[in-house]
Amino acid sequence: MLAQPGVFAFPGPELPRPERRAGRIVGRLWESEDMTAPMLARATDTGRMYARSTREEPVVPSITTVIAQQPHGLDGWFGYMGANALAQDAGLQSALNSPSKLRQAVQRAANAAAVYRDAAAERGDRVHNYCEQVALRQLDREHDVESARDLLAQNGEQAFADRFDEWWKAFEVRPIAPEITVWNHEVGYAGTLDLVAEINGRTCLIDYKTKGTTRDGQVKPLDDKVVMQLVAGMKAEESLVDAEAGEWEAWQHGAGPLLIAVAVGETEVRPQRANPEVLKHHWWKFCALKRVWQLNQEMLQDSTALLPLAPPRA
């Protein structure tokens, strides 16, 4: 039996609505989560943005872009990936006496973290696509489960599909809406939830995270920031009906749903529910990060921060 968290309705700090104006966007955020491509999402230099329809320009940041405003703390990992790539470079020995070849080896090592990140994101997209197709099939909607599974198999990743199928059956998941895009006007953000489903009679908001395997054969643990992602989805005000027409309806699944993060691995699938006691804190933190995002945009559109200074006149 799944635990029954209480219904919570807590306000966030008051935030200005984002201005609908074009602006210069610079810099690039580190977004390590699996990145699929919802119809209304647009990639920008500061992360993913959402539009109200396919005919309009994006006006609000995605949930993952907002969360990415917090420091990632990956400096040590970047250094390790670079050093490890250089140590394992097959051409390192022959490059020691060639400055040009050595520079090439160093460049490959410097790019190691980005290469790993991109490969992990592509794998995550393949796994997410399979999960979505399974839900569509159960809803008797158009799907392509076999092709999604074949693509995983071609990359040696069929174990992810096998473990996911086992979890889906064991939890008797009844999908309601896969890959549903939601919007919050008050705070100013949008996002796409992996799945709204019913499990054991409870409405659940579900987020999948594709995870590697530890040395002892267990799926790697989830990051607590997934709770921020789930609670932001819960606090949506509208959900998308028609992307081309820009038709939205009131969000129907925000009244006390069970928030579930599902770590999908090759050896197991480990679901975890968000602790109702901490949801308000994660929501307030999300709102604060949205304010940071908003201020960064305003600063980019302001005048130059530093001005030249001439010496005093004699």
Image (tube, rainbow, N blue to C red):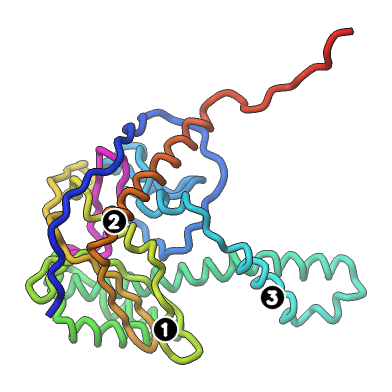
Q: Is residue 92 magenta?
A: no
- Dot label at residue 85: 3
First along the sequence among labels 2 and 1:
1
Amino acid type, callout 3: Ala
Q: Label 1 neighbourhood size at 10 Å, few (<14), some (14-19), many (20+)?
A: some
- Dot label at residue 245: none
Measuring from the top left, give residue 128's x and y in whole percent: 33, 70
Tag nearer the camera, 1 or 3: 3
Circles 2 and 1: CB atoms closer than 8 Å: no
SS at badge 1: loop
- Report the magenta stretch's main SS: strand
Tag nearer the camera, 2 or 1: 2
Q: Which residues are magenta?
A: 177-196
Quadrant containing the N terminus is: bottom left
Question: Above or below — where is 297 with respect to 212?
Answer: above
Which residue is under mark 1?
A: 157
First along the sequence among labels 2 and 3:
3
Q: Is residue 183 left or right of residue 1?
A: right
State the residue at coordinates (19%, 45%): 237
- Dot label at residue 192: 2
Query: Which residue lies most toward the right here?
Result: 97
Q: Is residue 189 magenta?
A: yes
Measuring from the top left, give residue 283's x and y in whole percent: 30, 51
SS at badge 3: helix
First along the sequence among labels 1 and 3:
3
Measuring from the top left, give residue 23's x and y in whole percent: 47, 31
Question: Above or below — where is 288 with respect to 97?
Answer: above
Quadrant containing the C terminus is: top right
Circles 2 and 3: CB atoms closer than 8 Å: no
State the residue at coordinates (36%, 74%): 127
In-front residue for pair 153/218: 218
Amino acid type, callout 1: Glu
